[in-house]
Image (cartoon, rainbow, N blue to C red):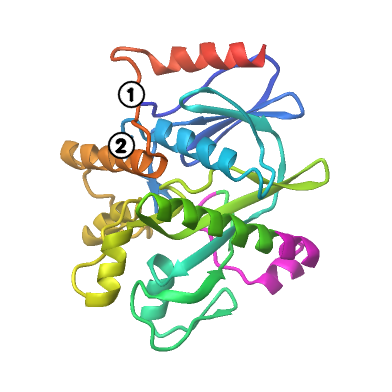
Amino acid sequence: MTIEGTDFHFPNQTSLYHGKVRDVYMIGDDTMVSVASDRISAFDVILPRPIPYKGQVLNQLAAYFLQETSDIAPNWLTSVPDPNVSIGHKCEPFEIEMVIRGCLAGHAWRVYEKGVRELCGVSMPEGMQRYDAFPEPIITPSTKAKSGHDEDITALEIIERGLATEAQFEQLSTMTRELFAKGQAMARAQGLYLADTKYEFGIYQDQIYVIDEIHTPDSSRYFYGDSYYSYLQKRAERPKNLSKEFVRQWLLEQGFSGLENQHIPEMTDEFIESVSSRYIELYEQLTGKGFERPPVGQDPIKRIDTNVRKALG
């Protein structure tokens, strides 16, 4: 049974926000309950069919990486009372996403292919080919749109628009680079290459905290290491990815890129199953642990409600 959406009423609940993937419940003034649904989005559009186990994979992977990187940067997470739920501090978010790219792929490649050599105020070297690694990772921030598409933004624009002070942006950049280095090292140890990802940050008790998910297939692009490095040497078959990029690629091949008046292609049962398998594969590949499916026939909505109420006391 997939979790397409939730509408709980927890004790001391003050608000509810339905994001593209997560349903976020505010409890009192300080606590946030994040429920990872099985919804999937691409090109900032929620696709019509949920993906089995996707929410559990995202929630458990995010918790794993937040716990593994807490020595680098403090984060919002305090407990994981359910496979699909994380509870933590309510932070005041920065309205930007800190995107960091280790190689020329995805949006960066699509821009570069058009002849553009600057992204978010950052120069990209001439003569690069698709998937080439940058001399050092580049940070290409974007705005956090409440609806529609996120937009690229430069560091100068961030400061001028008051989205962060110069000192804050410098700290955000440092944390982003350190988190990405740790993420790449963890991926490398599991035979993967972390190509790019994004981080979101907020303020809690006058300190910058990592918020939301990190290093999940929804926020990151992974390749199998051997496939990626083999491609750089031979320039033959594209590197095998283990992230949501293959969903975007499938949509592009069907003529959908999130533009107005475009129709989302039919998502067949076979395609849904392939996406679900990719998410589970990524979880197991990244953590080195087997994925534990919930008991057959269990109602996840009732389970979540029970576990969250117990955690909130």
| 43 w.r.t. 90: above or below | below
Between 87 and 18, the one lying in front of the other is 87
Q: Position of residue 144 (x, y in %)?
A: 59, 54
Magenta stretch contains residue 50: no
Which picture quadrant has residue 158?
bottom right
Identity, as a three-letter code, of the amino acid under mark 1: Arg
Disc 1 + disc 2, Cβ < 8 Å:
no
Q: Is residue 43 visible?
A: no
Q: Which mark is residue 293?
A: 1
> The magenta stretch spans which residues?
147-171
Between 124 and 182, the one lying in front of the other is 182
Magenta stretch contains residue 157: yes
Image quadrant for the C terminus?
top right
Counting residues from the start of the chain, the first of labels 1 and 2 encountered is: 2
| 152 w.r.t. 135: above or below | above
Which picture quadrant has residue 27?
top right
**Residues packed near mark 1 inside 10 Å, few (<14), some (14 to 19) or many (20 plus):** few
Furthest residue toward right: 206
Q: Marks 1 and 2, Cα distance to the nearest angstrom?
A: 20 Å
Identity, as a three-letter code, of the amino acid under mark 2: Arg
